[in-house]
Amino acid sequence: MYLSITQACLRDFCQPGIFYSNLAVLKLFNMKQIQNIEEYRAEYQKSIENPESFWAEIAQEFLWYKKWDNVLQWNFETPEIKWFEGGKTNICANAIDRHLEKFGDKTAIIFEPNDPNSPSQKISYRELHTSVCKLANALESLGVTKGDRVCIYMPMIPEGAIAMLACARIGAIHSVVFAGFGAESLKGRINDSNCKLLITADAFHRGNKKIALKEIADEAMADTPSIEHCLVYNHINEKISMVAGRDISWHTLVSVQPDTHEPVAMDSEAPLFLLYTSGSTGKPKGVQHTTAGYMIFMAYTFKQVFNYKDGEIYFCTADIGWVTGHSYTLYGPLLNGGTTVIFEGIPTYPDHGRFWDIVDKHKVNILYTAPTAIRSLETFGTEIFKTKDLSSLRVLGSVGEPINEEAWQWYYQNVGKNRCPIVDTWWQTETGGILISPIAYATPMKPAFATLPLPGVQPLLVDENGNEVKGNPAEGRLCMRFPWPGMARTLYGNHERFKQTYFTTYKNLYFSGDGAKRDGNGMYRITGRVDDVINVSGHRIGTGEVEEAINSHDLVVESAVVGYPHEIKGQGLYAYVICVDKSGNVHNLPEEVKKIVSDKIGAFARPDKIQIVPGLPKTRSGKIMRRILRKIAEGDISNLGDTTTLIDPSVVDKIVEGALNQ
Ligand code: WT7
């Protein structure tokens, strides 16, 4: 047996009803996959009639140090959600250790570097175990312990995943910050949760660009009092400066550590990670996920939705800096003993055939990517497919934003060769995992529809007053009436905001912030956000954050940012900016504004269009009427609606005039 067990755990194991005996014979996650619509209906029915026994049955397949007392306790008013309370487990042990005895030599991670001429790397479960144990020991040697927050600011390389798993192993809470974020964003995230340690790398290449990660981290760390140490992984031998006492070389520290480490038994509801995401207003929110419910939900949804079969190669293109990377590049596949591809680069480097080369080279069976990537590759045409072998593909997935029918068809025909189901998966950072999606080879698909709720998921549509819109077809705001194990439990340090954002708009419901339609057959189509969150290339951007960055420019008085339809990115950012110098020495201002947003937030949040305006349409209460700005940005100026409540309606004419002259 590979898991060494502490005396305390042994005591627990010996109590009746504890899954001690399962441990020795633990096989791959054995849960039955749904094969057809009848089985789906039966499973769905079971899951809503008795959610507790439904989820408990699945939970039994995992390694527990102690069995739970209650499957579920919940209250959407406070809100308080607890799954498997009283239980003790460790997600890292479930994702790695449980596979060692039988599948130790199996490949856990395939690493495909940015440069296609550099060798790719295969990491077995046993090797992954060793690396994670060494790092776990290293973290503990730095005084990091259960409950401490650790910020991970890493490129898309195996060490990023190893850092997450090592944190989970010792019970530290990881907070991954996407390596495309700038110093200001990194600093804000570190300070909000008082991270003790920052794990980063010297630098990395993405396509042709080099990103000096440590330099950005240094800039952030100039003002992060909680950081005691910074662990630096040497990825490309970049010359960097190291601050004595604070900065430590990963290689030096990790190489001397023992290669075994006993996982820490964590309470089911112990926080596993924080992931910051944007809301309509205010600072980014630290969405908090917990150990057991998250683990069970990711393992289940991964296996069902993608119809994952033992031995298959699975490639999710999402960076670990986003929730898709957490749930379906890392945890979902590893919990299932799967093989997951970690890709450092971008779809268009060295050319637009890179995804297809990776599929061909590693014989990828399941590909999970975002509509933006599909639309941008679509612009290069289909000639490229003549020379690529995509016959290994069996399932395709889409995530992050609505997929338009044209992109869906292109994906289906050219990539899937009309034989691979597409799973259009709807979910959010807050939901932890997929809630509405087809199940590959089992339930029907419909282009541009996320289709049906997964078992255990109870969606409904409500009108603006919160009344349920029943029957089909229907349209409304998408809510959930019952908890699922993978849902967020709070926002770090701000439970009140958690309550206000998701649970007070509609009484006793979780409100997603999305609008949706249901067709005559009850299939869901997600129409997009109904709040001020903008989805650019599947990245969630809060208008407030971008405005704050723009306003920090010396020549800017005020600004308003809205989304508009963008052919490739889904939505683009349109910024209306009031400049100090009304006479107009604004020559470089648009470029400078774009740069300041790139530097402060990250290149992905760079506005596509900037319009210098003399004023903004404000109501008497001082609120910007964004509806009007959205219409102008969309180019739909024929009917701007009622402007009589504005303090100065003439400002609208001036903005329209400016827009037409752009
Ligand atoms: C928002 C969540 C899902 C993980 C990655 C993004 C939009 C997500 C779909 C889909 C239509 C989608 C929603 C949602 N969205 N998936 N399949 N169809 N819209 O997570 O950054 O938390 O963003 O992305 O608007 O609210 P996120």
Image (spheres, helix red, strand yellow):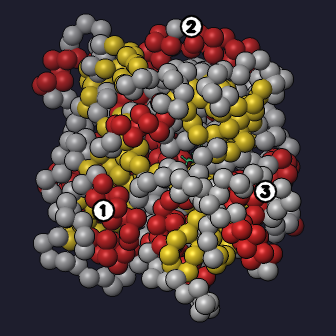
Q: Which mark is residue 640?
A: 3
**What secondary structure is found at the residue carrying circle 2?**
helix
The first of marks 2 and 1 along the sequence is 2
Image coordinates for residue 361, horizontal then vertical, percent: 65, 60
Q: Is residue 239 above or below residue 288?
A: below
Tell me: 538 left or right of 88.
right
Name the residue rendered at 47%, 39% in the picture.
501
The first of marks 1 and 3 along the sequence is 1
Distance (Cα) linking label 1 and label 3: 49 Å
Image quarter (top left, top right, bottom left or bottom right) of the N terminus? top left
Residue bearing mark 1:
199
Image coordinates for residue 138, horizontal then vertical, percent: 20, 56
Image coordinates for residue 405, horizontal then vertical, percent: 83, 47
**Mark count:** 3
Q: Are marks 3 and 2 in contact (CB under 8 Å)?
A: no
Q: Is residue 261 above or below residue 230?
A: above
Q: Nearer the viewer, residue 481 or 346?
A: 481
